[in-house]
Image (cartoon, rainbow, N blue to C red):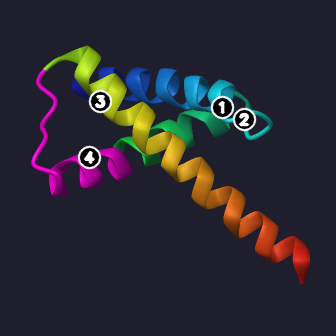
Amino acid sequence: MQILGFLLIGLIAGWLAGMLVKGRGFGLLGDLVVGVCGAFVGGLLFGLLGIAAYSVVGSLLMSLAGAIVFLFLVGLVRRRSAAR
């Protein structure tokens, strides 16, 4: 059941990040991948800062922040590869 919750939070975070970072959404499956990757990135970043998420809302915010950072990094890589 925890995996399902993790994927649901990842999907929501990826979708929200795609909406906030205009033009970088990847569709339903892509947003799920971005959200799950964002959850890992957010967990890493927040862990380095000593911040832990103890609720669903906290997990969603942490995943959203990570997904936004992840989308920003993907955008940088895309721009670099397009410039070549």
Residue 1 appears in the picture as rendered: no
x, y percent for residue 44: 26, 55
What's the magenta region?
A: 40-54
Q: Is residue 1 above or below residue 68?
A: above
Q: Mark 2 or mark 1: name the one nearer the start of the chain.
A: 1
Determine the image quadrant of residue 52. top left
Find the distance from the CA under tag 3 to the CA under tag 1: 22 Å
Task: Specify the amino acid type for callout 1.
Answer: Gly
Reading the image, the residue beneath label 2 is 25
The residue drawn where x is 49% and y is 37% is: 35
Find the distance from the CA under tag 2 to the CA under tag 1: 4 Å
Task: Specify the amino acid type for callout 4.
Answer: Gly
Determine the image quadrant of residue 7. top left
Contact (Cβ within 8 Å) of mark 2 with mark 1: yes
Q: Judge left or right: residue 64 versus residue 26.
A: left
Reading the image, the residue beneath label 3 is 3
